Image (tube, grey):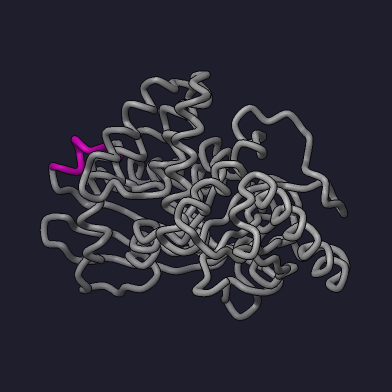
Amino acid sequence: MIDPLVNGVTGEQSVATQQIGERLAEIARANYPQFDIQPFSAATVRQGPYVMVGTFTPVNAKGQPVGTREAYRFCLVMLDLHTGKTVAKSVARALPGGIDATPIGFFSESPAWSNDASIKSYIDACQATKVGDSINPTYLNGIIAASTISEAIDAYDAGRYSDALELYLAAQRLPAGDQLRVYNGVYLTTWKLGRRDEAADAFGRVVDYGLAHNVLGVKILFRPGSTAFETEPQSATGPYSMWLREIADHSASRNACLQVTGNTSPSGSLALNEQLSVLRAEYVKELLETDAPGLRGHVIAAGAGAKNNLVGTAADNLSDALDRRVEFKVISGC
């Protein structure tokens, strides 16, 4: 099986990683008849097969995912679920030309991002391992949940929202189901199904997850060079007022102290980007305090410009939307 490849920093699946997975399956079927390629599902995971994991990550000239990205680092690892060992690994580079790094539908529309432990365990199972090592225990213990989430993502991207919701809820009930992908999925599917009150409650659980893990990046996008929100119609990612209301209410109920940090892509003037990121954070801070007056004195605004880019390609489109996120971080004092 192939556990769908991801960006090795964000954990997102993209058009490129999806195409790579399809190509790998084609190569295996054509050249390695001893392997029977099966879908990544809970049913096949329980048979204890070989599982391939991989990351495809934009990196700089030194191979690090910081600064100006000039290439893609490509990591593939084969895991043997029977023995619990890593049995093969290969790392290569790819030129960036012609690569479509646009996240697939679910990840493109997911409103929030956090450094989720389950995603980190997948990335570590590829990048932080060598042949002969035991499989990352967090990844191994969560593989049933991961396969159920993968089926849910496929159903969501196919427009089968009721099926996707059922699968996300099934994943949530599993021991390893406390994942942001699950909470994003429940929010997105209930919103798509027109269940607005349920969707608001689901986004509240997204917020609770972020607050419990001290940081939550939310894709609140602004017009270029402005503190005004992007106004393009977006069925799943546009209700910023509801998102901010849930963030304000849940933060106030916890008596949390927050640092709101604006981020920008690296394109354009460095000084202007840093100033703009501060202004955007201050605007969001004002909206939070309006929604929940009890937050006054509990929120500070900061700007990071492009210092904390996750993607870093300066594409300024859906492929690097996470670089323009607003980040909500729980701090120790107000």
Give whichever of 162, 256 is nearer the camera: 256
Tell me which residue sits at (71%, 48%) in the image.
287
Image height check: is 239 above or below 324? above
Start-end of magenta stretch: 40-46
Residue 72: x, y in percent?
A: 58, 64
Q: Is residue 317 left or right of residue 48?
A: right
Give whichever of 246, 74 is nearer the camera: 246
Q: Quadrant of the N terminus?
A: top left
Q: Is residue 52 left or right of residue 301?
A: left
Image height check: is 209 above or below 213? above
Q: Is residue 226 visible?
A: yes
Residue 235: x, y in percent?
A: 63, 27
Q: Is residue 7 magenta-colored? A: no
Residue 305: x, y in percent?
A: 75, 68
Among the 4 quarters of the image, the one containing residue 125: bottom left
Q: Is residue 15 visible?
A: no
Q: Is residue 223 left or right of residue 181?
A: right
